[in-house]
Image (tube, rainbow, N blue to C red):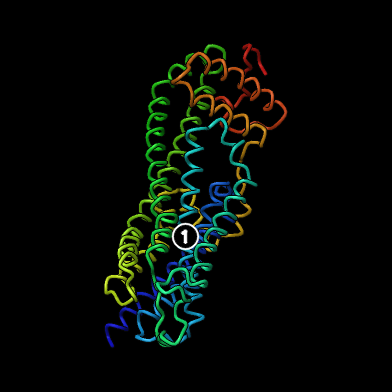
Amino acid sequence: MLSKVMLGVILSLLILLTVGGNVLVCLAVCACRRLRCLTNCFIVSLAVTDLLLGLLVLPFSALLLLNDEWPLGPYFCNFYISMDVMLCTASILTLLAISVDRYLAVTMPLRYASLVLPWRVAVALVSVWTVSVAVSFLPIHMGWNTVNGTVQNHGPWASARRCRFELNRPYVLTDSLLTFYLPLGAMCWTYLQILRIAQSQAKRIISTRPICITSYNMRNNPSTTTTLVSSVAAVALREHKATLTLAAVIGVFVVCWLPYFILFTILGLKEHPDPGMVPEFPIVLWLGYTNSALNPFLYGALNRDFRSAYTHLLRCRIPAYLGWRGRQPSPTVTAARERLTEMTLLCGSAPASCRAAIMDQNITLQDTSSRTTAPPSIHSANGTAPTNVNGNEG
């Protein structure tokens, strides 16, 4: 009895952490303007998946672990197992979508804004959830996962007080390959490429910064040049930090879920009549569930924007946080500076074209600044307006 009470307390804390942490992620993205980007649409989808897992699956998994019998009947048992498979599949496919998004952001920085559009992100999310529903509810309720072809937990031979997840070879091979092993291989390859390119870009920024500064200083204020190049490096560093954060999320996902899928595949190939009776199965299953509780803490530990949003939310400073704007540049100037950042990232491969592109982009930046209030980052050190490319006062 004491061991069951302790186990119940631990499982309850894990469920509370899963629900509370993922609610905090959703609120943070809603409250913080810096977190409202297309990439974080996938983060919110992942948080919603983990939140639904904590609300609709984990309590019943704890009930099944703490009790020797299933008291809720065969229909709800099949619904619970279908939800479990669906949410796990949605997590994997969402992480795959995140890795593709980061790959495009790093490998195609000049085309990223035209490739990753809001409607394409929406189509990707709808596809993720559609596929997840199709591979979970349909096979289980059609009996495609059982050895004899009947719906699991139904029929005269099924125990009324058991909740079994039956497995056969075709279902296990199809499900594990399409929803875990192949996406996992694609994610690992994608992030290896991202890390390789990120390291190469970091070396280019360091090695080509003096070239860009020299050509830019010939016609412009030195303090302005230093500020703009520092801004370029800061943007690139932020992009790399976001990539490493998401790579860490995927790494933890692999550590948590890989043992489950290995055991799931072995038991399925053996066509075990009741995998839940295997002593290791509940352990690896709850190790996988732990991933849903860890993701919000990974965001907070590795991303400064999430940490800041968490701090304001936990201190009940939501109205002040929502109303805070600070001194931010206008959208037109921001777009011009982002374009300048993209040009500067290519300095290492084409310094001559880089300098020409920077000078051309500076004309656009000066023109837009003359019609709007310039932000502090593009003013000179003494507070005066920057000079134009001809050296005349603007």
Q: Quadrant of the N terminus?
A: bottom left
For this orientation, the residue located farthest to the right is 371
Relative to 149, residue 230 above or below? above
Q: Quadrant of residue 224?
A: top right
Q: As rendered, which of 325 and 152 lies closer to the eye?
A: 152
Q: As rendered, which of 392 and 63 lies closer to the eye?
A: 63
Q: Residue at x 45, y 62 (%)?
A: 88
Q: How many marks?
A: 1
For this orientation, the residue located farthest to the front is 148
Left or right: 111 as drawn, with respect to 182: right
Task: Pinpoint residue 238: horizontal percent, then vertical percent.
Answer: 46, 39
Amino acid type of disc 1?
Answer: Thr
Residue 321 visible in image: no
Task: Pinpoint residue 120: horizontal percent, then vertical percent.
Answer: 62, 46
Q: Quadrant of residue 375?
A: top right
Give the residue number, with chain letter if any, for mark 1.
89
Q: As rendered, which of 12 and 365 lies closer to the eye?
A: 12
Q: Residues within 10 Å of mark 1 (few under 14, many from 20)?
A: many
Q: Residue at x 56, y 30 (%)?
A: 110
Residue 231 visible in image: yes
Task: Pinpoint residue 349: horizontal percent, then vertical percent.
Answer: 45, 20
Q: Secondary structure at mark 1?
A: helix
Q: Residue at x 40, y 30 (%)?
A: 202
Q: Residue at x 36, y 60 (%)?
A: 257
Task: Pinpoint residue 378: horizontal percent, then vertical percent.
Answer: 58, 28
Q: Quadrant of the C terminus?
A: top right
Q: Quadrant of residue 379?
A: top right
